[in-house]
Each structure stands twice: as structure tokens, then as C-alpha cells.
Amino acid sequence: MSFYPAKIFVVSANASLTASLRRHLRHGSSVETCGILVSDDPHGDVLGTFRQISNALEKHPASILRNSTALLEIGFSEDELIKQNLLVESGDPVQTLGAMLISAFPEIRWVFPRTSDHFQPVSEVRDGSATLARRLLCGAAPISPMFDPEGTRDALRQQVLIDDNTRGLVPHFGAMKRDDIGASIDDEEAYAYLHAYLSFRLGYRCYIVTTLRGLSSFRDDRQIASFTFEDFFLNFPDRSGLESETSLLGERDIGLSNLAYRDDVYRALGRVTSRVFVTVGHRYTIWHEQNRMHIKKLKASGKTVKVVYKPCAGMYRLLAQSGLLRDYWKRRNREWSACHPTIGRSGSHSAPGRLLFIADSLIERAERVYETAQSVPDCIHGALLALEAQELLGYRTPTTSLEAIALRHKLEVKAECMFQGMEYNIDVKNRLHEVEQEVKAGARWFSPSVRRRSALNAEMSVVTEIMRIFNHYGQFDEEQSCLKRLRKLNRESYFLKHPLLISLRPIRWYIETLLASFPLFVLAVALWPLILGILSWALKANFACQPNCSYPHITNAYVLFLGHTPVGQPLNPAAQCLTVFISLIGFVHLGIFIAYLYTLVSRK
């Protein structure tokens, strides 16, 4: 199966290279070359040239960009480019332009030809070890750069840390370094992108493998990845070539769903130390018992193997079932600690302007993706852009960082709600915990006088946006969890503004707690009259009763609590006070019950 990028963007001041590519690729009907002519001298205005290129690229939808290649003719190879320090003003402007574009468009494959000769055939134009045409057409297995499998973006960040003059400006880059490599192998694109994104969040630069051709790079004995998400049952769209592969073992009916066969043919998979297999769990395959024995064999050899069943209850539950949630929180805590204001050189109180410029571009694009997203890969694409912006800033520009945080969570939640591979009930508890911690990390960069108020306002804003998404997709329980958190934040904000009313805080807490849990409400209705009845007995409250008739104190409390008149006229002060108090408490609980019913009835 031939693979062609959706588009090839040519960034060059000379149109001859575009024309040459069109001639060479004229037989590829799915290829559309698009020339972008920039200033002949980008040295004078790097930011202006960057905007011009960005505007041309951003005209295309996300689904096109993440399957496209861009040829940037700057006279430097990629190896030379990643040695560029983004924050050094005295650096080569053209190299800086290339580094900025790689950082701002992580989903595009960037190719950098070393020659400026446009008149020789493109197939002969070389940029090092391979022909330019071969790289543009993905002559080898196609590699998506979205999750930085080759480490280009990570290398650009680490270059800033190497320089003593810029290390103090971005100390958080060290905590966000991704040394290990992962792979997401699935014939369903939605799962492949979701698992790759989670791997990236865990600290792995990740390959996305959705074709048999892409899996071919795992034939080597060398260890390509140390961690994988793999579907049990693989049936790639280009599986027509499988017969020639199975003939290697002389058994033409064996497929990739046989794990032993998979590891024999794709030997690099057998060297992976940590593997998560995702499956629907059915046993309607002749390989079921063999796969179970192969997994036992892998575990016995010291490898970490987990089996996760579809569907899952959101991203965090998937991590928990994979045994990775603790590792995830450890990494997040390291990142939050590295972004503390006390770390770094004095005076570096905000993100460097160039990083802020790139982050703004990423956030703008993520916002557009959010508005137009129609699929899980679209949402994951947008979430990655917001995550990249967040990591570039390291919370040092708090308002922009909080905007990126909110956008990332919105896109992640939207992906969870759109994904048919998710359970109806989604894990919200961990989501709200991460929002809280991220907002706190960002609020550290505000003035102490407004820090707490700013954190509450930011968290309320993020939770409200998430709640609206749950409401839109009919996730009622998840919406209620967000509403419960929102009530708590509003309560804290209110008493922060009105400290003189702090004595009323327990009352509001009690009412909001009962609104959030119907079982607790039922328990409260059962216990209050019992406790007040016992108190009535202890205070010897006296009620006038009919002759030869006595009413227990607890019965009287239940009758009053449920809104009826007392069993008799209260005769002493204790009885009079209890009558008023029990009636008031019963009225409050009746209001809570009506509010709860209204919440259920008004559900859209």
C-alpha cells in the first residue's frame, strides 16, 4: 500500500522547487503540493516570516495538517537545527525560524534540504542520508511526529538547558524531558491516538502505528521502544501483504492476533520491557489460550504486562487499569515542583517572550481545533497543542498558562465523551484533582495578595467549562460531580470575600453536602428526628396530650420534622424551643429535597 502525505507544503523563496516537486509527484493523485513563498531575506523579520508561514498553514484543517509534510529550505539540516538555542538573540535568525516552526507545528513532518539547487531532479536532491523525494513520500515506514518519537522537539528544549545563560529561564524543561520511547499500536485510529497521548503524558516519546507498513520498523532485533500500548486483535487496512510475511514461518493462516507470532516476526516488540494489551475481552479466537500462555511467559521473563479491557471509564481509569496512574502522578508532581517560583534565576518571573509567542500560536490553533473537532483524533490533536503550550510556559506567565490548562482539559473531556470506546461513566475525581493542582501551580506566580482568589476563580472557570461539555453529551453523573466541586469553590470564594460571615460556613457546607448525595440526605432525614427526640427526652420537654394518651418524644420529633403540627401544645420553654427548632430543620430539609428533585427533573 503506497503512502502519501495529505499535502506537501514547500516553504521557499524560490518557486522552482515547488514546480520541480509537482513534476516529480505528478503520478501521486492524493498528493497536492502547496507552495508558500516567504521573504527572500527572513533575517530581517523572523517573527513576521513566522506569521506568514503560520497563516498559510493554518488555513487547512487539523486532519490535513497532522498528515502533511513541510519542506523548509533554510540551508541547515535537522541535525544542525536542533543545536539552535531558541532563546539566544544572537543566534542565526533562519535557524531560529526553523526551530520556532517545529515547536509551533508539532504535528507536521518537517524536512530540511541542504541544497539550494532547484534545477536538478528532486529524486537526486539529497539532504544527507536519503533522497529528498524519499523523505517527502515516506519511502520508509510513515512516522507521525505528533508525539515526538524522534526527539526533535525535546532536543530543542534541552539545548536551552545546556546554555548557562538560558538555563535559569526554563528550569522546568528538565522535569519535562522525555528520555524513553513508547509505541501505540492499533488498527483503530481513535485508540491509537488516545494511547499515544497517554504515553506522551507519562513521559514517553511515542510512535503511532496504525498500518502494517508502520509496524515493519519493529522487525529489527534492536529495542526501539521500552513501552507499548497494543491492541490484541490487529487487522490493519494494508493487511493484504500479510501472506508474504506469514510465509516466513511457513504458516500462512497465522495473523497478528497471535502474540507469539507477532513477537517472532516483529522482534523489537519482544524486547519491550513494559506492555499494555488492550482488548474487548472476547474469546472467540483459536489463539486465546496460546495468547494467555504467551503473556505468562513474558511475565515470567521479568517483563511488565497488563491486559486492559474495552471499554474503559476515561483516561485516568485506563491509566489505573494499566497500573500506570501512580507513575503519572509522580511525573506530574515533579513537573509542578520544577515550576515553583523559587526555582531558577532571580528576576526570571515570566516566560521568555519567544516561548510566549509560540505558546500563543499553539493556544490559538488548539482553540480552533476545539470549535471544529469532529473526532477523537481531532480532540487529541488539539489537546497536544495546548499541552505543548503549557510545557513551554511552565506556568511562568500564569494567565496564558491557565488558558492552556483549561483548553487542554476541555479537549480531553470532549475526546472522552465522543469516544464510543469509553464507558458511559467517566472518572471525574482524578480529572478534578489534576485541575486543582495545576491551577495551584499556576497561581503561585500571582501576587500573594490575590493568589488564593485567583486560583479559586481560575478553577471555577475550568470546572464550569468541563461541566458544560458533560451536560452537552448527557453525562449526568459526571456533570453532578463537577457541580459538587463548583459549589465548594463558590463557597470558599464567598467566605474569602466575606470573612465576617465565616460562622455561617458550616451551615452552607451541610446544605451543599446533602444536595450532592441523596443517600446522605436520606440518612440525615432519618437521624435528625432521632437525635432531636432523644434531646427532647433529656430536656424533659412537656407537651399537652389527650387524657390517658402518651406520645414518645421521638415520635413527636418525627411528626414535627415532617411538617406536621406537634402532638400537643408545648407547655414548658424546652418544648417550645424544640418545636420551633425541629420545624425549622424540617423546613430546611424539605427545601433541600425540592432542590434535588428540581435538579433531576431539569436534566436536559
Image: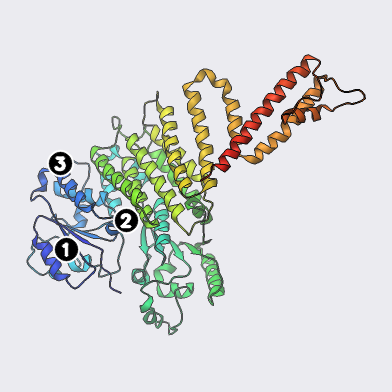
In the image, what residue occupies the spot 11% across and 70% down?
121
Which residue is denoted by mark 2 in the rendering? 148
Q: Which residue is mark 3?
A: 90
Q: In 3D space, how far apart are the residues under numbered discs 3 and 2 (Cα atoms)?
A: 27 Å
Q: Amino acid at mark 1?
A: Asp
The residue lying toward the viewer, choosing from 70 and 332, is: 70
Q: Position of residue 190 (x, y in %)?
A: 41, 60
The answer to whether residue 370 is left or right of residue 92 is right
Q: On the rendered image, what quadrant is the N terminus found in? A: bottom left
| Numbered badge on residue 127 | 1
Sequence-first disc among 3 and 2: 3
Q: Report the colour scheme.
A: rainbow
Relative horizontal placement of residue 458, taking residue 482 as reference (left or right): left
- Measured as percent of width and height from the top left, residue 512 is found at 58, 33
Q: Real-space Cα distance between discs 3 and 1?
A: 26 Å
Callout 3 amino acid: Ser
Mark 2 neighbour density, 10 Å: few (under 14) some (14–19) many (20 or more):
many
Residue 268, numbered circle: none
